[in-house]
């Protein structure tokens, strides 16, 4: 696919006031700095690749080339025992059912498959080793928790509708990764400082500006990482899955998963989901199946969150 860019009808990241249109000079500077961070991430492929730990890049490249085996992935991960241990922890969790204990990457591949091992690698690195943003601990933690909630919800919905089941968990996990990458870059270039964090009105400008561009940045990064197009499209279109000129099923699935995460109150005040919500109906979900997806997500979320961070 072509690399994502901001649409003509959307905000222009080259304009400091593109989203929040602040009047305060300091707020304008923050908005412009966050925009600059978003532009650099969106346009620089090398920068996008460096956002992902080397071990994860190697695993993705191996799987994308269709040359990966349980043995080869075990070799790739041998240099990072922490990631290996976390993968095995999640592979033994309730998300993948009961059975004999998985004690090696090879066994994990046999039990859950290559695609799921790919998802587990991404789960571990996004939850444990990436996004150390000084002063933004609360925001990072909220976005991490939200990503896991959306991932388990997306997986539950995908199983019910029989579409995109191979990519749903990973899509949910990464659907808001643009937020984290933009905030991390803005902190590194000195836009988000301890002084900014002490002023809620400036912090809100930064978060709103990040929200304006997170879809485009997230999709560009997924593209650079060589992830399946269904994942990139889900990340790109989860806020605009249906317009006058396109309809994106992966984006629609992510939008419904987001509604379930809202229902669960992860990162937001709990917002009960109407079982006959139009987005759910249009995706082919009945009230009974929506309820089942919610129950599965609520059951699995705390277990996966805990397993992915066990040290």
Image: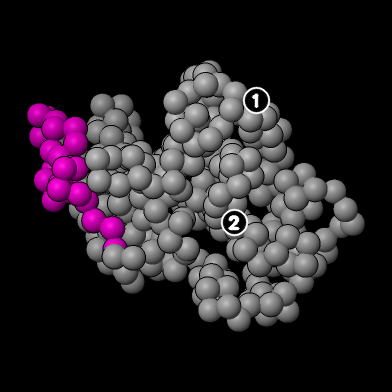
| Quadrant in which the N terminus is drawn | bottom left
Quarter of the rendering containing residue 204: top left
**Going by the image, does 237 lie left or right of 261?**
left
Say which residue appears at 53% left-offset and 35% top-offset: 284
**Residue at image point 74% right, 55% down:** 91
Between residues 1 and 301, which one lies in front from this camera angle?
A: 1
Element assignment for label 2: loop
The label number, if any, that marks residue 51 in the structure image:
none
Is 138 situated left or right of 160 in this image?
Answer: left
Task: Tell me if residue 13 is in the magenta stretch.
Answer: yes
Magenta segment boundaries in residue numbering:
3-27
Of labels 1 and 2, earlier in sequence is 2
Residue 26, image x and y in percent? 15, 35
User: Badge 2: how crowded within 10 Å, few (<14), some, or many (20+)?
Assistant: some
Question: Is label 1 in a helix, a strand or a loop?
Answer: helix
166 drawn magenta: no
Measured in 3D between alpha carbons, the distance from the residue under mark 1 to the one under mark 2, in whole angstroms, is 23 Å
Question: Would you name the residue on which mark 1 appears?
Answer: 288
């Amino acid at each position: 696919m072509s690399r994502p860019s901001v649409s003509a009808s959307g905000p222009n990241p080259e304009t400091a006031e593109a989203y929040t249109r602040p009047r305060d000079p300091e707020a304008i500077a923050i908005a412009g700095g966050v925009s600059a961070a978003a532009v650099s991430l969106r346009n620089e492929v090398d920068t996008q690749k460096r956002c992902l730990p080397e071990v994860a890049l190697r695993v993705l490249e191996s799987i994308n080339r269709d040359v990966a085996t349980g043995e080869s992935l075990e070799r790739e991960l041998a240099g990072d025992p922490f990631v290996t241990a976390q993968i095995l922890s999640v592979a033994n969790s309730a998300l993948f059912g009961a059975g004999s204990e998985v004690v090696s990457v090879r066994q994990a591949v046999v039990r859950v498959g290559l695609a799921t091992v790919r998802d587990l690698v991404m789960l571990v690195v996004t939850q444990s080793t990436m996004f150390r943003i000084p002063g933004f601990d609360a925001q990072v933690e909220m976005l991490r928790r939200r990503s896991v909630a959306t991932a388990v919800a997306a997986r539950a919905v995908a199983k019910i509708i029989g579409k995109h089941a191979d990519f749903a968990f990973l899509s949910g996990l990464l659907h808001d990764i643009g937020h984290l990458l933009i905030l991390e870059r803005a902190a590194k270039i000195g836009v988000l400082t301890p002084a900014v964090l002490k002023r809620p009105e400036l912090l809100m400008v930064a978060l709103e500006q990040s929200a304006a561009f997170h879809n485009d940045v997230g999709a560009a990064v997924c593209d650079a990482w060589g992830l399946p197009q269904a994942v990139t499209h889900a990340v790109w279109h989860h806020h605009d899955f249906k317009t006058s000129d396109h309809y994106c099923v992966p984006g629609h699935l992510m939008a419904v998963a987001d509604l379930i995460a809202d229902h669960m109150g992860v990162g937001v005040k709990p917002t009960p989901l109407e079982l006959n919500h139009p987005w759910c109906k249009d995706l082919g979900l009945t009230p009974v199946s929506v309820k089942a997806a919610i129950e599965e997500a609520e059951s699995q979320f705390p277990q996966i969150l805990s397993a992915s961070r066990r040290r």
